[in-house]
Amino acid sequence: MVLPFLVLTGILAALPLQTEGMDTPALRVTQERLGIPENLARVTDVCWLSAQAPPNFILIQDVHRYPEVQSRIASLIVHGYEKWGVKKVFVEGAFTPLDLTVFHRIPSKMRSFLMERLLKEGELSGPEMAAVLIMEREWRDPPVSPFQTFGMENPQLYRENFIAYRSVLAQRERALEAVLSIRRLHASMNFSEGNPMTDQLNRVEALVRLRLTPAEYEMYLKTKAQTPSSPELTPAVKAAEEFYQVVQMRSRVFLAEATRKVPASDAPRIIVVGGFHTAAMADLLRQANISFVILSPVVSSVGNEEPIYEQRLRHTASLLAQAVVPASR
């Protein structure tokens, strides 16, 4: 089942697309080996020796409901299918394999128009678009091993993450007002930028806004003793910590699920996830000495989409809670 609106994963899409803000020979060589045009996506992290077989995983960073990104993700998946023999794609925000056969009951001209419209409206993802395009080819010339797209979500974890998100959202405004009051207090005490308490307050604000990267979240935890406390701020901080704890658990579940469904060939498995998950999963794969490449789709800007995203979150939250997220594993 695909969620009609990806509540949890999209909130993390405000994180930067680039996991590694650097350009190294290893990244450039990997870009060339994979044959990916630089105007489509950039290799931003890699753990793949040149003498090895194809990487075990290719992680594509997602910005949900953003048409430019979704279009590029679809192109990357089709490229992987054609050039690398990719047969399995894994996505967050879904609990089961994706069934998109309904699109093939629509005449081709109307199907193309419908897909383009749904993509612009944020109702069709890049992986879904790629699956429709690839399945159309496979229906004409059935392969031995068909292309498949799987959801990676655990229903209970997703529900816990959603509840934590809703709790943060309900308390965020009061918490941010408390942060502003503390900033004024710091200013009156002539605290400068770079002061440990000021740095931690910056991390607390990002925490409550759910905009921390994995590295920033780890730093927040290391300096947690310096976190300010108030009746308005503390509950929101606790809810945000619960949110990130479950997000980290979901990252581990995603990898376990993608590893469990081994492809019939040595082709890479593609995983499409948001920025926080991508960085966290890269750390886990590197620790396990499993080869991977991270691709960040090239995008002009994502900053203007966040207000629209928040509006849609508020509009769909209660519906998702009641009808979409199962209550048990």
Image: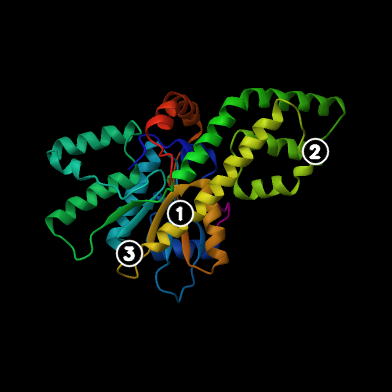
How far across and how far down the image is residue 135, in percent?
A: 21, 52
Q: Quadrant of the N terminus?
A: top left
Q: Amino acid at mark 2?
A: Met
Query: Residue under circle 2?
Result: 197
Residue 269 seen anywhere in this rendered image of the structure: yes
Q: Is residue 229 left or right of residue 308?
A: right
The mark nearer the N terminus, 3 or 2, is: 3
Query: Residue under circle 1?
Result: 254
Which-is-in-front pick, marks 3 and 2? 2
The mark nearer the N terminus, 1 or 2, is: 2
Image quadrant of residue 185?
A: top right
How far across and how far down the image is residue 92, in percent?
A: 42, 47
Residue sitting at x 16%, y 44%: 104
Residue sitting at x 60%, y 41%: 242
Structural crowding at the residue carrying mark 1, measured as other residues with C-alpha within 10 Å and reported as few (<14), some (14–19) or many (≥20): many
Structural crowding at the residue carrying mark 2, measured as other residues with C-alpha within 10 Å and reported as few (<14), some (14–19) or many (≥20): some
Q: Name the secondary structure under disc 1.
A: helix
10 vs 74, nearest the viewer: 10
92 up-or-down from 170: above or below: below
Dominant secondary-structure state across the stretch colored magenta: loop
Q: Is residue 305 left or right of residue 134?
A: right
Residues shaded magenta: 19-23
Which-is-in-front pick, marks 3 and 1? 1
How far apart are the two marked residues, 1 and 2, measured between alpha carbons? 35 Å
How far apart are the two marked residues, 3 and 1, measured between alpha carbons? 22 Å
Query: Residue under circle 3?
Result: 84
Residue sitting at x 67%, y 26%: 175
Residue 13 seen anywhere in this rendered image of the structure: no
Asked whether residue 88 is drawn in magenta, I would say no
Which-is-in-front pick, marks 1 and 2? 1
Asked whether residue 22 is drawn in magenta, I would say yes
Numbered tag placed on residue 1 in the rendering:
none
